[in-house]
Amino acid sequence: MSYEFIKTEKQGHILVVTMNRPEVYNAVHVDMHNEMADCWDAFAADQDLWVAVLTGAGDKAFSAGNDLKATAAGGAKKKMTPTGFAGLSSRFDLEKPIIAAVNGFAMGGGFETALSCDIILASENAKFALPEVKVGFFAAASGVQRLSRYIGRLAAQEMMYTGRTIDAKEALELGCVNEVHPHDQLMAKAMEKADQLCSVSPSAVKATKRVLNDMNKRDGVQESIAYSREVIADLSKTEDFKEGVNAFVEKRKPNWVNK
């Protein structure tokens, strides 16, 4: 598999996927969303690939989330994959596990991408936030649904309403991540975890995830994420939404008007 904005490498039964836009902290635009969707489609179809590890290029960022500059430049007019942010947030039919190796900050959609994976390992340097409210958005790519289920609604609400950033230690305490490792050991630990998953029956793992996917459907997660897209469409018509994007691009403090 050859792509412009991500790198892929097969190691036995493991697929390593690297978000590869380090110059913008691996922020994701429409073309990158679509590349990642294609990558996950190919991963699902390849019987020799049992587990994936997802990480970001460089030492600073897993992913800065949505590329707001690309959005402001008209990128939002391009057609985006129906499988959601990074080709993952609205994908409910993938039966193979993905390990997120969060090597730096995971902000907004970057955090939502990690939350859309099955196991999250973090570097001690990692930081996490859903800061969309600071720029006139909200965590519409499954952050509302997944974070509130993983760490509990009260803690998630406080994070989502304030947009505050947490470090790897707090993320582990809250239950946002499975493990925290020294930065220089993160990928080795992620590959060890992938090897551990490869040592058990891949058919049994797929069956387990099939039931988990079904639980998400029965719990209404899929419908709720679809509703988030309706709400973000309404939000995009507000003055605050336009102001948030413009203020970010112009590197100034937003002037909110609540309409």
Image (tube, helix red, strand yellow):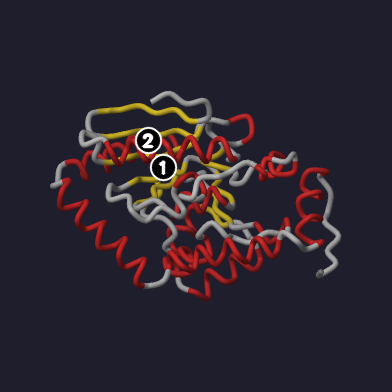
Q: Amino acid at mark 2?
A: Met
Q: Nearer the viewer, residue 169 or 144?
A: 144
Q: Residue 185: x and y, percent?
A: 38, 36
Q: Amino acid at mark 1?
A: Ala
Q: Residue 123: x and y, percent?
A: 45, 43
Q: Residues within 10 Å of mark 1 (few under 14, many from 20)?
A: many
**Residue 57 drawn above or below residue 193:** above
The N terminus sits in image quarter: top left
Mark 2 or mark 1: whose residue is earlier in sequence? 1
Q: Nearer the viewer, residue 2 or 254?
A: 2
**Residue 41 drawn above or below residue 220:** above
Q: Residue 96: x and y, percent?
A: 28, 47
Marks 2/1: CA distance?
Answer: 7 Å
Q: Return the mark for residue 101.
A: 1
SS under mark 2: helix
- Residue drawn at point x = 57 percent, y = 71 percent: 157
The C terminus sits in image quarter: bottom right
Q: Quarter-wise, where is residue 244 in the image?
A: bottom right
- Residue drawn at point x = 25 percent, y = 58 percent: 210
Q: Quarter-wise, where is residue 49 in the image?
A: top left
Q: Quarter-wise, where is residue 242 in the image?
A: bottom right
- Residue drawn at point x = 45 percent, y = 65 percent: 174
Q: Residues within 10 Å of mark 2 (few under 14, many from 20)?
A: many
The residue under label 2 is 187
Q: Residue 130: x and y, percent?
A: 59, 58
